[in-house]
Amino acid sequence: MIKKYKKLVLICCLFSICVVGLGAYTRLSDAGLGCPDWPGCYGFLSVPHHEIHAEVVAENFPGMVIETAKAWKEMIHRYFAGALGLFILCIAVWAAYINKRELTPLRLPIFLVLLVIFQATLGMLTVTMQLQPLIVMGHLLGGFAIFSLTGLLYLRLTAQSIPGGDAGARRFQGLCLISLWVLIIQIALGGWLAANYAAPHCADLPLCGPDSLVRFSFSDVFHLPLEHSNYEYGVLSADSRMSIHLLHRIWAVITSAVLLITLFQLWRNCYSRKIKDCALTVLIALGAQLSLGVLLIIWQFPLSIALAHNIMAAFLLLSVVRLCYYVKSRC
């Protein structure tokens, strides 16, 4: 029974990255308001397509035109997100059933159920509050959290302790956790950038133009627009969006430096092959993410590269979570 449970957790983890990717694709293709209501679409469980549906839409949503392609992107994302919620509920119920006999983690699956409920609430608010940036950023972080925590649950079920521990790596538990939080801040800044449609407002390298440092303002970065009825395509000024993008790049340099210092210290001081493999995985994911970020600017923000940049950020987060787990719990 425990083997089947482990397989279910692994499938759920893989399914969650699909949901993260679909969410990113929906956002990047400007389909976040493809359906103006929630959880259905114009009052239906799928995208309206019959003439009688059009009459109901015209009556209940006057003046709105159904953009079928955008609506289907949004609804497919919702279908997958709903299925993920059922997966996680099954995991929690199964964990409660076998917990006493198999000593499987129980609190983490229960927390995941609560997180899914919160994530669904954010999904509803994303639509009803017309893509309010703070809600959109929170929704993105929630998806990343579900992916990384299902990955952590699978690690807790399958990971084996390092024989004899690794005293060399154990000394850097704090540094690993700092690296994790620095990365989470960077992902949050990326979510804030995407929620405010700030990517095209910094199309140069390495800065956003010759006067970008002069135009940069922290107050513009953290300005929270609340007075608008619709936030699609962004409402902040060009300078504000440029500042958001520039801070994301600056923090990317800081994040890379912190991660590289952490990986160097672990590689130099630890002797466990497992820790070294975890560190190498983080290094590869970091290199891929930085390369995608540069290509995103050089090629002027193609959708495919932007989507890959989002998904790779999730894998980078999971790789750092995995590294922290082995250093803290298995050494």
Image (spheres, grey):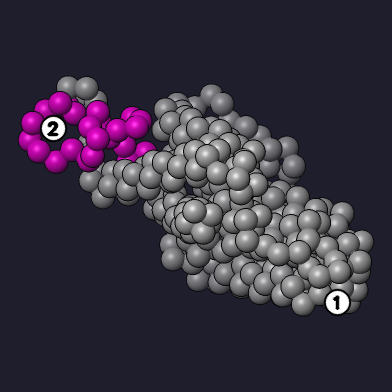
Which residue does the image show at 62% across and 56% down from the upper left?
157
Q: Nearer the viewer, residue 320 or 210?
A: 320
In terms of depth relative to the viewer, which is nearer, 58 or 217?
Answer: 58
Residue 31 position within the rendered picture, expressed as x and y whole percent measured from the top left:
36, 46
Give residue 209's position: percent from left, percent from top: 66, 62
Q: Quadrant of residue 55?
A: top left
Secondary element at tag 2: helix
Considering only vertical position in the picture, is 237 above or below 274?
Answer: above
Dots 1 and 2: beta carbons under 8 Å?
Answer: no
In-front residue for pair 207/100: 100
**What residue do we see at 66% from left, 34% from top?**
223
Pointer 2 residue: 53
The C terminus: image quadrant: bottom right
Is there any visible trace of residue 86 in the rendered image?
A: yes
Region in magenta: 30-58
Residue type highlighted by circle 2: His
Residue 141 against residue 205 in the figure, above or below: above
Going from N to C along the chain, the mark reached first, 1 or 2, is 2
Report x, y in % for residue 98. 55, 44
Label the magenta part by its dominant secondary structure.
loop
- How crowded pointer 1 is (Cα within 10 Å; few <14, some 14-19, many 20+) is rated as some
